[in-house]
Amino acid sequence: MKKSHIIGIVVIAVAIMIIMSTAGDASTYVSFGEAIERAEDGDMTKVHVVGRLKKDQQDHIVGMQYDPIKDPNYFTFMLVDTNRVEQQVVYYNPKPQDFERSEQVVITGNMQQNVFVADKILLKCPSKYVEKDVAKTASL
């Protein structure tokens, strides 16, 4: 075999190993019910859960606790998934900026005992463009 063939095979093997290692880290989107079932079965793989913050009549977030003076790396809140199942979420990092303004939340983590422990929080914040403003500009 020529040296170029051997180098080509090595490069392909390395590329396959990189793809396989990244695919192993990928997690799936589930509901809280499925996350609980996975935890009960002993499956501690990371999953994504999509939901909305639980709010009261005055539009305040229910169950949110964050005291940066007491513990800046402990943040907890209630999240309602797409199946309307609510679950307490604990995040061992500082509260994300503009958390209160978010419309939708995607959390990555797993169930541990009776809480969902999140490793990452992704926020979908409301659009800065109001529909009336867009309509007004379109008519000009």
Image (spheres, helix red, strand yellow):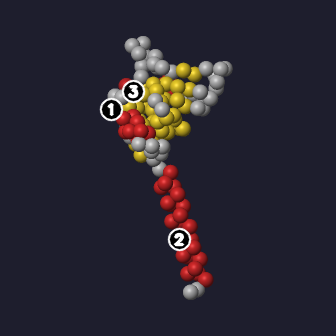
Q: Percent position (x, y) of residue 78?
A: 45, 25
Q: Are marks 2 and 3 in contact (CB under 8 Å)?
A: no
Q: Residues within 10 Å of mark 1 (few under 14, many from 20)?
A: few
Which residue corresponds to the image point at 52% horizontal and 57% vertical from the top-left? 21
Question: Furthest residue to the right?
Answer: 69
Which residue corresponds to the image point at 49% horizontal and 35% vertical from the top-left? 112
Quarter where residue 67 is shown: top right
The secondary element bearing badge 3 is classed as: strand
C-alpha distance separating marks 2 and 3 = 46 Å
Q: 117 and 130: which one is in front?
A: 117
Q: Earlier in the sequence, mark 2 or mark 3?
A: 2
15 w.r.t. 115: above or below: below
Q: Quadrant of the C terminus?
A: top left
Q: Percent position (x, y) of residue 83?
A: 33, 32
Q: Residues within 10 Å of mark 2 (few under 14, many from 20)?
A: few
Q: Residues within 10 Å of mark 3 (few under 14, many from 20)?
A: some
Identify residue for label 1.
83
- The kind of residue on which mark 3 rests is Glu
- The kind of residue on which mark 2 rests is Ile
Q: Percent position (x, y) of residue 135?
A: 36, 29
In this rendering, which labeled residue sits more in front, label 2 or label 1?
A: 1
Identify residue for label 2.
12
C-alpha distance separating marks 1 and 3 = 9 Å
Q: Is residue 79 left or right of residue 3?
A: left
Mark identifier at residue 59:
none
Question: Furthest residue to the top?
Answer: 58
One can see residue 139 in this view: no
Mark identifier at residue 86:
3
- The kind of residue on which mark 1 rests is Asn
Q: Are marks 2 and 1 in contact (CB under 8 Å)?
A: no
The secondary element bearing badge 2 is classed as: helix
